[in-house]
Amino acid sequence: MIHESAQIHPAAVVEEGAKIGANTTVGPFTYITKDVVIGENNEIMSHVVIKGHTTIGNENRIFPQAVIGEENQDKKYGGEETTVVIGDRNVIRESVQIHRGTTQDKSTTVVGNDNLLCVNAHVAHDVIVGNHTHIGNNAILGGHVTVGDYAGVMALSAIHPFCSVGAYAYIGGCSAVVQDVLPYVLAQGNHATPFGLNLVGLKRNGFERAELRALQGAYKEIYRSGKTLEEAKASLAEIAKEWPSVQPMCDMLENSERGIIR
């Protein structure tokens, strides 16, 4: 069903069964398959491909040559009806690829709200991207990766499958991330190593001086105190009692399967 206010270019191909909401525009030579659901006030430009069981929210801008909901590149994939779910107000630039999930994991790939995915960024199967993230040009999020809210993965960086990038973390350009990056941490290199906190990003997002000092204290407990990881966990748990923003660091330390960057 296509809403009467949606504007579909005559040169676009929209299969019967696709749902397109009010005031959404679809440019020429774009191809949308039958199981796609698109919300309101989206701008979908020319030469975009949207396939599979893909759901897109409202007020997104999708630029030419983007491919969303295509079959993933996992050799185990056998054509199962897995999904892509995209939220609201995202900017998805030229040639971005977002692949559908696999039944071996979550069966879905998720991009939240208010994200910027720059030119040729690759979002692989079963990836979870939070809200307000910045994924740079030619950045690669391998399968099963999680990127937390307000995190940045800069140009030409690659995140190894099954790794997590914590909220407010910042991955500098041309980095190779092969283990988890704690929330708030600035990382760079091949392989990526920590370089303190993402202080610029934290200040821009309203973190006050006292809270920053608490986060810096937590960082020092992990990386500069000489303590074992188990000893640092105990110290962070105490800090988190006064500063809840430290708790996400505790959670990742507790739940990390690949270990954290050192």
Image (cartoon, grey):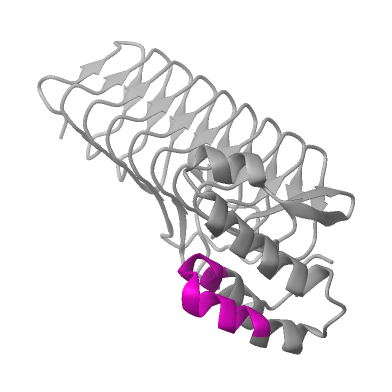
Q: In the rendered image, is residue 167 in sight?
A: no
Q: Against 145, is 136 above or below?
A: above
Q: Which residue is outermost to the left?
A: 4
Residue at screen point 62% across, 82% down = 254
Choose between 41 and 131: the one closer to the eye: 131
Numbered circles on residues, count: 0
Please tell me in which quadrant of the rendered image residue 8 appears: top left
Choose between 228 and 145: the one closer to the eye: 228
The quarter of the picture where the N terminus appears is: top left
Does 54 appear in magenta? no
Choose between 161 and 237: the one closer to the eye: 237
Please tell me in which quadrant of the rendered image residue 114 appears: top left
Q: In the rendered image, is residue 233 in sight?
A: yes
Residue 61 image point, x, y percent: 40, 25
Does 244 appear in magenta? yes
Numbered range of the magenta stretch = 235-248
Residue 72 image point, x, y percent: 58, 52
Residue 217 image point, x, y percent: 68, 67
Residue at screen point 80% across, 65% down = 261
Residue 260 image point, x, y percent: 75, 70
Residue at screen point 64% across, 52% down = 169
